[in-house]
Amino acid sequence: MSEAAPADAFTRGMRSGNTAAAGARGVLLHRPRLYDLFVELALIGREPSFRRQVLDLAAPRPGEAMLDVGCGTGSLALLAREAVGATGVICGVDASAEMISWARQKARRIGVEADFRRAAAQALPYPDASFDVVLSTLMLHRLPKRARTQLAAEARRVVKPGGRVLVVDFAEESRRKGLRRHLRHRQGLVAWQEIPALLEGAGLSVVASGPLGIQTVHFALAAVRSSS
Ligand SMILES: C[S@@+](CC[C@H](N)C(=O)[O-])C[C@H]1O[C@@H](n2cnc3c(N)ncnc32)[C@H](O)[C@@H]1O
């Protein structure tokens, strides 16, 4: 059974899917300029503080390696460069060629070094234990259920011992039960309890979770269990 989520303004007009990374499951975005504009308008001037809040939670430090999964146009990854400094590494992956191309252009334009690659969240192109910080922002709701589990497993695989994984997304209370909730979930909604559960299920220890204070955005921050 197909688990594809519905198309929207950003996905309409996509070119036959051949710009997507192999194996990607989820709704890819192909209109980077429109997406950046949408985020700016939707957050009504609060995008910089939203991005800062996310980075404060992940707390990248000088010299660390950070990966943004489903990085879109790269806004968060580029902002993180300052925190990791010249000795740190910033990587971003997105399954959409258009988003990656735009992220690279943005990096060149502002003179920030970052490695953006087209890749599926379900098959990250990095060896085990490559990153101190792995994060994913506003992406989970774009994935069907099984792909969410795969994302968490891949994040767990590429994070170093002692590293952390942060997932941030729009989420709702999961009190609503039954068919209605099931249908809403199939349309891409995330129940907020699902975010920490996903990370725990991947073998990570959730150290903090809750609302971010912006719209319905929730987060879960996890660390690699010391025994693993
Ligand atoms: C709503 S955007 C969020 C972008 C960015 N993280 C942000 O905070 O602005 C979700 C992104 O996930 C990407 N995406 C969806 N499914 C994916 C998959 N299976 N693998 C990698 N990227 C995917 C889309 O192409 C899109 O750029």
Image (cartoon, helix red, strand yellow):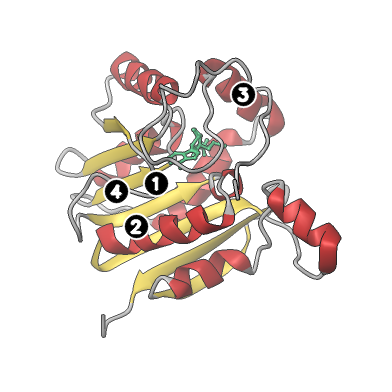
| Pointer 2 or 3: first along the chain | 3
Could you tell me how far apart the alpha carbons at marks 4 and 3 are, in whole angstroms? 27 Å
Q: Amino acid at mark 1?
A: Ala
Local crowd at mark 1 within 10 Å, few (<14), some, or many (≥20)?
Answer: many
Q: Which residue is mark 2?
A: 154
Q: Amino acid at mark 2?
A: Glu
Question: Which residue corresponds to the image point at 43% horizontal and 28% vertical from the top-left?
Answer: 96
Ligand 1 near label 1 (Cβ, under 8 Å)? Answer: yes
Q: Position of residue 175 (x, y in %)?
A: 80, 70
Q: Position of residue 199 (x, y in %)?
A: 46, 68
Q: Quadrant of residue 90?
A: top left
Are discs 1 and 4 less than 8 Å apart at CB?
no
Ligand 1 near label 3 (Cβ, under 8 Å)? Answer: yes
Looking at the rendered image, the disc whose residue lies closer to the viewer, 2 or 4, is 2
Q: Which residue is mark 4?
A: 66
Q: Which secondary structure, mark 2?
A: helix
Residue furthest left in the image: 87
Q: Which mark is residue 10?
A: 3
| Pointer 1 or 4: first along the chain | 4
Look at the image and tell me in which quarter the C terminus lies.
Answer: bottom left
Question: Which residue corresponds to the image point at 47% horizontal and 24% vertical from the top-left?
Answer: 17
